[in-house]
Image: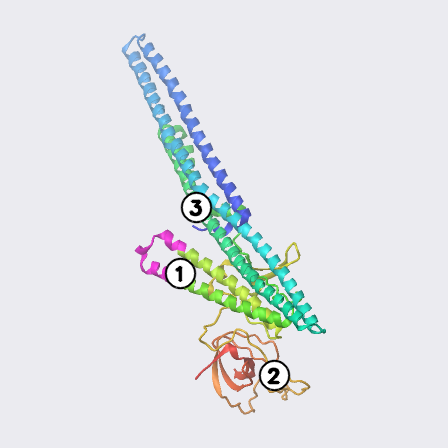
């Protein structure tokens, strides 16, 4: 059962589910009250029958005649038997219908309260971490601006006749500010990670809350079905005239389907499935609209890229440990109970979400670095899930919204290739030649008028190939002379123009492609 966790999400889903659970508890209390009232009514009825039976016995002493006495005695016996039937019915209603529903309701409340409190606690902690991250973000951006002003002032001092001693003193102060900024940046990154951990903690608590309440709701519906069935069976046995109506109630109570009812509740009042919103790291230097010296911007971006790659590598190793543990649980089922296996699966999902968030941060930094160097942006398959907006203060805020079915390490935004391969995450392209108007070697002629550049004609001699290479990553051309390649393609290599861009042929089409996207075959 996992319907609740797919429909009751965010704060509104939690509140709606909690409200519905309280309504279910009140309904059970009402049902218990009804059963007790019905038991009291039967008690009053058999008490009245007892009085009537006593009167009948007294009246029997006044009867004359065997036939009359026998008939009256049969009436007295009938009244006494009817009294006994309703006495047992009263006790059965209280013991088998009212009391179990009361005990069941009290147990459900006790089971629901701790998971409900856990969600509220995690929600509060997540909110506080979000506020702290915004505070650190504001401080980091402010310090960046101050540092930039200081560097600009230092540059101005160097352009004017200023004593070297003053320049060295001011430069030392700038370096000190730069070191301080590094600590602030790390605190900002740590806060970003803690915020994501807080979100994951809140999400886990909410998942457990949904699972617990769905299980409790299933038990509640089964308990109600059992109570109504018991009630129907009691009256079916003692009230033949109402047998048809009891059958109808029995049919209706037996037809209660917890899965169907739960699904109807989800569709009717559930706000919808989960759509995680992961808050990404918005560094000052990654926003090219923020004023900053270009060389310092590039240096800071490179440093943060290295830090992010190291963090990804650490998280990747941690996830590999979880995968090993999960495999051990699968290979040895007796090693862990079912809940332990569920917890490991959940931890893997959290690790995947964290990897996607960190990879998205890395992708943002790489895009900013590529834009600074006028290089094409790296390819990714989930760029559509990255959304940039402005918060209330007008500051840039970037979030990652990957659907749940896409949240996995295999579908990460920007997978870090194996360090042993001679590939680069940041492909560059050589600048165009100055004052050159003719077509370069990367462009094919269109002399035959077919309008397709790079296409080999049947009467053209095939080019000489120096090697073959296998495509490791997909590449979508950005220029007419570039070659469209997909992972797994085998490209015939014609020429290595430089260390970044090669020229090759694929399916009769000649063009250039990034060298870092392929692996040369021996």
* Horizontal arrangement in the rendering, residue 462 relative to residue 325 (left or right): right
Residue 94 lies in the magenta stretch: no
Which residue is found at the position 42% from the left and 41% from the top?
Answer: 111
| Quadrant, the C terminus | bottom left
Which residue is found at the position 50% from the left and 58% from the top?
Answer: 404
Which secondary structure type mostly characterizes the magenta part of the structure? helix
Between residue 217 and residue 178, name the one nearer to us: 178
- Residue 371 image-quadrant placement: bottom right
- Residue 342 image-quadrant placement: bottom left
Secondary structure type for disc 2: loop
Q: Which residue is mark 3?
A: 212
Q: Position of residue 217 (x, y in %)?
A: 44, 43
**Position above or below: 492 against 193:** below
**Position above or below: 61 against 159:** above
Which residue is found at the position 35% from the left and 12% from the top?
Answer: 55
Residue 322: assigned label? 1
User: CB atoms at circles 3 and 2 under 8 Å apart?
Assistant: no
Q: Tell me if residue 71 can be seen.
A: yes
Q: Position of residue 304 (x, y in %)?
A: 55, 67
Disc 1 and disc 3: Cα gap in Å? 25 Å
Disc 3 and disc 2: Cα gap in Å? 62 Å
Of the numbered discs 3 and 2, the one sitting upstream in the chain is 3
**Camera-side mark, 2 or 1:** 1
Which residue is found at the position 57% from the left and 77% from the top?
Answer: 428
Q: Which residue is mark 2?
A: 453
Q: Which residue is at the far right?
A: 160
Secondary structure type for disc 1: helix
Q: Residues within 10 Å of mark 3 (few under 14, many from 20)?
A: some
Q: Residues within 10 Å of mark 1 (few under 14, many from 20)?
A: some
């Amino acid at each position: 059962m996992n319907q609740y966790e797919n429909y009751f999400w965010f704060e509104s889903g939690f509140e709606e589910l909690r409200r519905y659970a309280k309504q279910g508890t009140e309904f059970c209390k009402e049902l218990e009250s009804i059963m007790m009232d019905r038991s009291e009514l039967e008690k009053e009825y058999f008490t009245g029958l007892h009085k009537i039976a006593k009167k009948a016995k007294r009246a029997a002493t006044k009867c004359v005649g065997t036939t009359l006495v026998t008939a009256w005695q049969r009436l007295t016996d009938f009244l006494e038997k009817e009294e006994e039937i309703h006495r047992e019915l009263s006790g059965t209603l209280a013991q088998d219908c009212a009391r179990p529903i009361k005990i069941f309701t009290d147990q459900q409340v006790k089971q629901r309260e701790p998971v409900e409190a856990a969600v509220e606690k995690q929600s509060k902690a997540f909110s506080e971490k979000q506020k702290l991250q915004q505070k650190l973000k504001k401080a980091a951006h402010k310090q960046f601006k101050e540092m930039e002003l200081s560097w600009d002032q230092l540059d101005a001092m160097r352009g004017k006749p200023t004593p070297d001693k003053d320049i060295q003193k001011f430069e030392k102060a700038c370096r000190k500010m730069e070191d301080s900024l590094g600590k602030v940046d790390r605190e900002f990154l740590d806060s970003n990670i803690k915020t994501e951990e807080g979100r994951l903690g809140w999400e886990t608590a909410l998942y457990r809350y949904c699972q617990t309440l769905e299980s409790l709701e299933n038990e509640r519906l089964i308990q109600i079905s059992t109570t109504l069935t018991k009630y129907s069976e009691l009256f079916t046995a003692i009230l033949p005239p109402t047998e048809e109506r009891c059958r109808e109630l029995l049919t209706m109570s037996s037809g209660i389907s917890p899965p169907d009812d739960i699904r109807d509740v989800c569709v009717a009042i559930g706000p919808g499935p989960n759509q995680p919103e992961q808050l990404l790291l918005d560094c000052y230097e990654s926003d090219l609209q923020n004023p900053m010296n270009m060389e310092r911007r590039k240096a800071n971006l490179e440093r943060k890229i290295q830090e992010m790659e190291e963090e990804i590598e650490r998280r990747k190793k941690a996830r590999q440990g979880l995968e090993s543990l999960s495999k051990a649980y699968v290979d040895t089922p007796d090693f862990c109970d079912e809940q332990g296996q569920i917890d490991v699966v959940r931890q893997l999902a959290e690790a995947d979400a964290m990897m996607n968030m960190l990879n998205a941060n890395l992708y943002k930094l790489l895009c900013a670095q590529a834009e600074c160097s006028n290089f094409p942006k790296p390819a990714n398959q989930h760029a559509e899930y990255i959304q940039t907006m402005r918060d209330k203060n007008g500051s840039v805020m970037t979030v990652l919204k990957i659907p749940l079915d896409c949240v996995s390490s295999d579908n990460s935004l920007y997978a870090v290739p194996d360090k042993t391969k001679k590939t680069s995450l940041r492909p560059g392209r050589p600048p165009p030649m100055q004052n050159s108007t003719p077509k370069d070697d990367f462009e094919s002629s269109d002399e035959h008028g077919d309008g397709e550049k790079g296409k080999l004609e049947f009467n053209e001699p095939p080019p000489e190939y120096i090697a073959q290479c296998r495509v490791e990553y997909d590449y979508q051309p950005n220029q007419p002379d570039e070659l469209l390649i997909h992972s797994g393609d085998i490209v015939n290599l014609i020429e290595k123009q430089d260390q970044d861009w090669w020229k090759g042929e694929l399916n009769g089409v000649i063009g250039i492609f990034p060298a870092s996207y392929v692996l040369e075959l021996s």
